[in-house]
Image (tube, rainbow, N blue to C red):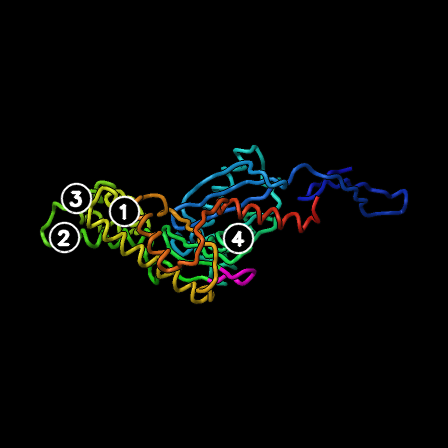
């Protein structure tokens, strides 16, 4: 007799030559609890949630960026796998305990990118149910079934939403070279450019410029330029918190940068309202991303701009983190495939 385990049962295989049966007789026994992994990955971080089949969060983890358009597919895969190891170690579980995986990642909106990431994850999580979607899809899923728009203000920027039970549409989210207007990356880039121009003019006493160099631990702008050319994703998003703090303290240069950002983010919202034909309908408007809640000045200004762009919107907050939403989707896939338990 030998015992063979798969992801749904333990099978006892017994040779039965006496009955003229030369194959195997399979007797299934139920395994214990099954688990799902959910990932929310972007240009700055990857968050992971381990959830059991009853919808309980068992562990959470966090690693570096997993947007393949920024860090490459190898880097994205490493971040996802690193986060999965964190949560499984914390829960004292192994990969064999996982039944499904849902990864919502920035940078996989194009079919080819999605397919490549799905292939890589399927190889890393063999014999598991694997789903790949964008991180923006996760935010809309978390908003419920009614008409809703989610404004993403983080390392990148986008507005994503749908009419009631309609298809998901997106404005923005094209990355730093073709978009991401109003994002933390964009604010950091513009603030650094403004400070560098001041330095070129011989003005070396700009408080904001000095704070940027200090935060990034750069001796001078020449040193910072070299880092920008090498790893811009590690430079520009880190400038945003500096600008946000300076704006709260009354720095007009910082406030001007945030005013432009708020205007551009509100423009994304207005464009999506037009595409969804929601100008005369009430809908839920949610904000998410690392820029939200970092600056009282920016939050107040952004809300004003958004209310001007969408007076019919009902403001709300995402109650469930995106990684947890991904985990719930994975549990659903697992239960559907297994017929429920």
The local secondary structure at tag 3 comes to helix
Instruction: Give the residue pinned by disc 3.
Output: 207
**Distance CA(mark 4)–CA(mark 3):** 42 Å
**Percent position of residue 65, x then y:** 41, 47
What residue is drawn where x is 43% and y is 58%?
Answer: 312
Where does the image place residue 192, in percent across and percent down from the top left? Answer: 22, 51
The answer to which of marks 4 and 2 sits earlier in the sequence is 4
Category of crowding for the residue at label 3, using alpha-carbon neighbours closer than 10 angstroms: few (below 14), some (14–19), many (at least 20)? few
Q: Classify 96 as above or below 336.
A: above
What SS does tag 2 mark?
A: helix
**Which one is in front, 97 or 25?**
97
Most frequent secondary structure within the magenta stretch? loop
Q: CA distance from mark 3 to mark 2?
A: 11 Å
Q: Residue furthest left?
A: 202
The residue under label 4 is 141
Going from the N terminus, do you reach mark 1 or mark 2 first? 2
> Are the residues at dot 1 and dot 2 in contact (C-beta closer than 8 Å)?
no
Residue 253 placed where, x, y %? 20, 50
Q: Above or below — where is 264 with respect to 5?
A: below
| CB atoms of marks 3 and 1 within 8 Å | no
- Residue 167 in view (yes/no): yes
Q: Which residue is mark 2?
A: 198
Report whether 277 appears left or right of 340: left
Identify the disc placed on residue 239.
Answer: 1
* Other residues around mark 1 within 10 Å, as few (<14) / some (14–19) / many (≥20): many
Q: Earlier in the sequence, mark 3 or mark 1?
A: 3
Point out the tag, 3 or 2, that comes first from the N-terminus. Answer: 2
Local crowd size for mark 4, using a 10 Å CA cut-off: few (<14), some (14–19), many (≥20):
some
Span of residues in magenta: 162-169
């Amino acid at each position: 007799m030998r015992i063979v385990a798969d992801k749904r049962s333990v099978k006892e295989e017994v040779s039965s030559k006496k009955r003229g049966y030369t194959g195997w007789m399979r007797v299934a026994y139920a395994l214990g609890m099954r688990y799902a992994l959910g990932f929310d990955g972007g240009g700055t971080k990857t968050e992971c949630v381990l959830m059991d089949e009853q919808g309980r969060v068992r562990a959470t983890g966090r690693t570096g960026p997993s947007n393949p358009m920024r860090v490459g597919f190898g880097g994205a895969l490493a971040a996802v796998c690193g986060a999965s190891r964190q949560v499984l170690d914390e829960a004292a579980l192994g990969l064999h305990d996982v039944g499904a995986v849902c990864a919502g990642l920035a940078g996989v909106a194009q079919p080819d990118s999605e397919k490549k990431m799905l292939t890589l994850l399927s190889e890393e999580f063999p014999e598991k149910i694997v789903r790949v979607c964008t991180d923006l899809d996760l935010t809309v899923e978390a908003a419920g079934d009614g008409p809703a728009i989610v404004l993403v203000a983080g390392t990148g920027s986008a507005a994503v939403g749908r009419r009631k039970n309609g298809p998901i549409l997106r404005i923005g989210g094209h990355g730093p070279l073709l978009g991401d207007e109003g994002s933390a990356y964009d604010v950091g880039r513009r603030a650094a450019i403004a400070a560098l121009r001041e330095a070129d003019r011989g003005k070396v006493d700009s408080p904001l410029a000095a704070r940027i160099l200090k935060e990034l631990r750069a001796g001078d702008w020449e040193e910072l330029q070299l880092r920008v050319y090498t790893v811009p994703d590690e430079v520009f998003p880190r400038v945003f918190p500096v600008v946000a703090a300076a704006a709260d303290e009354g720095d007009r240069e910082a406030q001007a940068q945030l005013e432009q950002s708020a205007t551009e983010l509100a423009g994304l919202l207005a464009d999506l309202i037009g595409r969804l034909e929601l100008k005369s309908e009430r809908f839920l408007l949610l904000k998410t991303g690392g820029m939200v809640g970092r600056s009282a000045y920016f939050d107040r200004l952004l809300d004003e701009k958004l209310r001007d762009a969408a007076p019919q919107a009902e403001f709300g907050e995402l109650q469930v983190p995106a990684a947890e939403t991904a985990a719930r989707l994975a549990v659903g896939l697992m239960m559907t495939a297994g017929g429920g338990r």
